[in-house]
Image: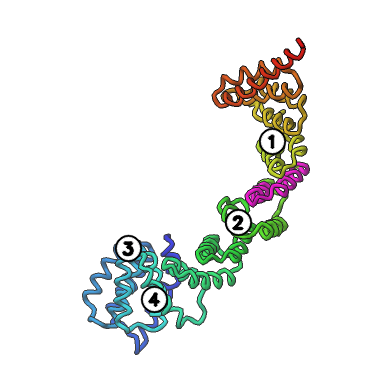
Amino acid sequence: MSNWQSITLLTLLMFFNTLTMAKSSNQYSLTNETYKALVSAQELMSKEKYSRAEVELLALLNKTNAGSYDEAMVQQMLGYAYSSQERYQKAITEFEQALSLIVLPEVVSHALRYNLGQLLLIEEEHNKGVEMLEQWFEVEPSPSNDAHALIASGYYSLNNFKQTVMHMKIAIRNKELAPENWYQLLLAAHIELKQYSAGIELVELMIVRYPHKDPYWQQLAFLYAQQNKEVSALAAQVLADRLELSDGEVLLRVASLYRYLDIPYKSAQLLETGLQKSVVIDNQRNLSFLANSWLAAREREKAVTVLKRLAEKDSSGESDLKYGRVLFDLEQWQASSEAFDKSLQKLKGTERGTAILMAGLAQFQLGQLKQAHFYLNKAKDYKSEEKQALHWLNYLELLIESKSVAQRL
């Protein structure tokens, strides 16, 4: 059964009730022939034999008097037959003609306006669809949440985002478990209106409900970025308090959010806690994330501890190189030299040039000038390191020469 068929089922039931009432009503009476033909068409439609029902209804329509109640009822039924086959333009035509006769009971006309408005929106006739639904809202004593969501979608297509927000808020507020796409529509309207605070509040709720959906984290990061750093940090903390951080994937997403907001220290703290509690897997990817967070927070000593663990897991040599560079920055020359040597046992490609250059600089700092010269001479063979290696080689050769002169003197 199609979405349209499901939505119009109640309206069809109302139509058939009206059909039964029309048999005995003086105000709304059908000819015996029309009544029997409509009942026959209804039975065919209940068996999803829409094409046969259409044929019978078209034959019946040719026999009805123009502008009569019979004609309006047949046109309405024909509209349902077309819509059930997803032939919406034909359904729209029949519904509009049935309404234009102004002979249907108000309860039927009212339901028909809603269905017609819905079909117009499906066919992207948004102005007419919203106008028809507004007529329905004017006399509907208790509009459903679905009705509010429907007209909100129409207003969104017309770029009337204020009306979208108004109707979607009502729809979501009155529904205990609103569909996910309702939240998405409301969020889109908030963003269009630059209502970032309202958008943040909504997307935080969406993340709590759907914590594993990537787009919502990205949208939240964007919205947080519209605020100043202090407010963003506070908002991220409030969100973290509401989330179940015993879920490793969720914890990693919160940590990534802190990094996006340029709050690396909080990111690293959260990751460290997750690793200690075994919520986050102690693997190469997560250790690299943690090390980079500590480095971004300028906590080199803490980064060194993580990088040492990471280097033991990484067979590529890249982590040994990074470990060595951080040790070099901390002026731990001997430890950095050993790390560079380890990286050279594993590294391949252009990064070998960087490792060789750094190994030479570490040897220079250790006063091992011949070893430094050896590494730097090899580093100049790599295009990316050639300029820097030659600079250090020239300096080193001048230094060696000056020492030699001093010794001779």
Q: Is residue 282 above or below residue 72?
A: above
Q: Residues within 10 Å of mark 3 (few under 14, many from 20)?
A: some
Left or right of 338? Residue 26 is left
Q: Which residue bears the numbered disc 2? A: 225
Task: Identify the residue shown where x is 33% and y is 67%.
Answer: 81
Badge 2 amino acid: Ala
Left or right of 55? Residue 342 is right
Query: Could you tell me which secondary element the residue under label 4 belongs to?
Result: helix
Along the viewing direction, whichever of 254 and 104 lies nearer the viewer: 254
Badge 3 amino acid: Arg
How far across and down, in percent of the image, does residue 214 sit?
A: 57, 50
Q: Which residue bears the numbered disc 4? A: 132
| Disc marking residue 87 | 3
Res. 384 in view = yes
Mark 4 vs mark 1, foreground winner is: 1
Query: Could you tell me which secondary element the residue under label 3 belongs to?
Result: loop
Q: Residues within 10 Å of mark 1 (few under 14, many from 20)?
A: few
Q: CA distance from mark 1 to mark 3?
A: 56 Å
Q: Earlier in the sequence, mark 4 or mark 3?
A: 3
Task: Give the residues drawn in magenta, as a range.
Answer: 250-277
